[in-house]
Amino acid sequence: MSKKRANRQGGLFLERKLDEHGKSVVKSESWVAQYYVDGKRVRKSTGTSVRSEAETILRDWMSASEKGLKPAPQTQGLTYSNLRADLLAHYAEKQHKSLKKKKDGTPYLFPLTALDNFFDGRRVNDIDRETASAFVANRRAAGKSNSTINNSVRLLIRMFSLARDNGKLTAVPKFELLKTKSRQGFLPPEQFQKLFDAMPMSLQPMLLLLYHSGVRVGEAERIEWPAVNLDAARITLLEGETKNDESRILPLSNSLVGLLSRVKQREGRVFPSKRAMQAAFPKACKAAAIEGLMVHDLRRSAVRNLMNAGVQQAVAMKISGHRDASVFQRYNVVDTKQTADAMQRVQRLAPVKVRRALPARPARRGGGR
């Protein structure tokens, strides 16, 4: 049998096992692909119970072997730990701000903890859509939200993508994210004064900056005094100081300029830490009788305020630091007041006089046509 012919032979089957009565039953709903590479049989779960999808996956694997590529089923020695190490190395190389270090210097990503607890010790060949679904079920049983689970799944997807990019895998499983609802927490301008008054004085400048500009709280805590120009009423964020590593200008409101002008010692960090704001925020909300608000909702509120003030979207995105217009629009959730105001503007643009009573229709004569 030639190598070419052997590589082209393949098929699909469902794994079976004997039940307690000795009857053959299906062990797994996922189709298992079988084909030959250099005369050696290769078997691998496709991770799907849909036969048409499984056939597509099988064709891709067989095509890869024809081209001399390294298919996933032949990576028996590759483990989750290998992919995890590559992910951390990639984040360190790219200097991702989400990469943190423990006290002993060990790098880590917070969403990795759940993945480590579930996948540690597993071979890559054993990680497919079924095991990913089991991971999701495990996290839900622990009471975690879809958003929190997605944070971990995204890292799992990134691991496999890197393995493919690095030539360690050819075909990778398709992991799907869960549906989530975008938060719609906002702080109306009429309620902001209450929150401002309830906030400790040391945190009031930071609160104003977050609410007026929509800057991320992590960006705000890194601002140092040399970046502040009170005469020009602006703060310059340089590359490396922002989440997306792009410099931008934060315009300052008159009230914030007034507060910052009172500061005598203008050295080091301008604003308190993110941790300090997050610790004081719920207490201030409780004192102001504001429920269900989070610090990040100030960013969402700033976007709405900018748009309500008539600021062009491109300008508003430059202030808030949004690069993706679709993400910006998720923050700019339109409320009923905005739609009502829009209709009032339309009516002023195209006014129509409505008569008090409609004219009576003339009576029809006779009973004929």
Image (cartoon, helix red, strand yellow):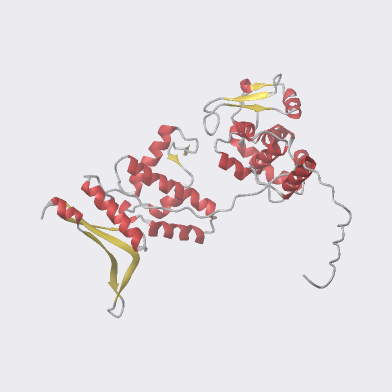
Say above or below: 305 vs 43: above
| Residue extending farthest right | 356
Seen from the viewer's position, the closer of residues 78 and 103 is 78
* Residue name at image x 55 percent, y 29 percent: 241
Q: Quadrant of residue 52?
A: bottom left
- Position of 230 compared to 90: left or right? right
What residue do we see at 72% from left, 34% from top? 204
Give the number of marks.
Answer: 0
At 52% from the left and 33% from the top, the residue drawn is 244
Depth order, front residue of 257/327? 327
The one of 26 and 85 positioned closer to us in this rendering: 26
| Above or below, comparing residue 333 to residue 208 in the picture | below
- The residue furthest bottom is 21
Vertical relation: 332 (above or below) 314: below
Q: Viewed as shown, does residue 21 lie left or right of 249?
A: left
Judged from this view, the residue extending furthest toward the top is: 231
Among the 4 quarters of the image, the one containing residue 89: top left
Q: Give the image location of residue 199, x and y in percent.
A: 74, 39
